[in-house]
Amino acid sequence: MKLKKWIIVWCGLSILIPYMTYGRESSGGFNLQGGPSSLTLDEVISKVEERYKGADFSARFYQVSTLKVVEITDTAKGRVFVKYPGMMRWEYETPEKQIILTDGKRLWIYRPGENQVLMGKAPSFFGEGKGASFLSDIKRVRQYFDAAMEKRDKNENYVLKLLPKKEMAGVSEIYLTVDRNRFEVVQIVTYNIYKDETRIELSQLRFGQKLDSSLFRFNIPDGVDVLQFDEPNR
């Protein structure tokens, strides 16, 4: 197992997205008529909550993870599937195939190239909105973070700064970029106390997919090595 690759995986898990250029297809013709006019912080969050409440969705993602001290930067891309409440499936296509998925209780990381699956408890890694898990239950934004409005990005999208209400392992601050018309989260940038950064750009968001819960459970193939995660300090 290559150390660098696992460092980047941990960076992505613990600090899972202010400008983005994207082309997106999104279902349903949804438009909350936000437009370029100024909205208050509470209004923006309320519109995001309305967009995501109980909604299953999928998207393409592009991820850039940077460990500042050791000057390691890695990129990845793939597809993500999200189902309320608490279910996520991240399918990495490059630089190597792997799947990170949770049913809200258990976490699996499957690396077919290593013939290994790592297992752990989902709340230890995704609880309280960590690891972008607020996408699967948007109310976690208000519940676990203090929010402030930042300067809009070059496309006039809203940018929200989130600070954990209490100490959160692996997370010191999060920046959400919210599409000014559709109120979809199109970018998440997360930092830890060491200023390591994980940036995730989301595109081709598709809502209302009615994803089956079985998509978020992992059936371990025969002959695969099974390892247990050590739980991170909270």
Image (tube, rainbow, N blue to C red):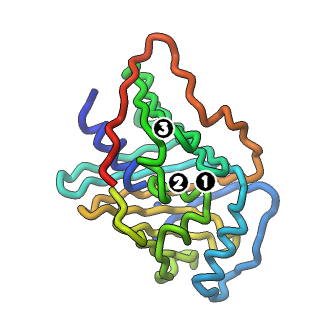
Q: Where is residue 73 in the image (x, y as percent from the top left)?
A: 29, 50
- Residue 133 badge: 2
Q: Residue at coordinates 46% horizontally, 32% vertically from top-left?
A: 98
Res. 47 image quadrant: bottom right
Res. 69 image quadrant: bottom left
Q: In which quarter of the image is the N terminus?
A: top left
Q: Distance between the residues labelled 1 and 2?
A: 6 Å
Q: What residue type is labelled 2?
A: Ser
Neighbour class for label 2 at 10 Å: few (<14), some, many (≥20)? many
Q: Position of residue 72 (x, y in %)?
A: 24, 49
Q: What residue type is labelled 1?
A: Ser
Q: Which of 218 and 65 is in front in this view?
A: 218
- Residue 107 badge: 3
Q: Distance between the residues labelled 2 and 3?
A: 12 Å
Q: In which quarter of the image is the C terminus?
A: bottom left
- Residue 136 badge: 1
Labelled pair 1, 2 in contact (Cβ < 8 Å): yes
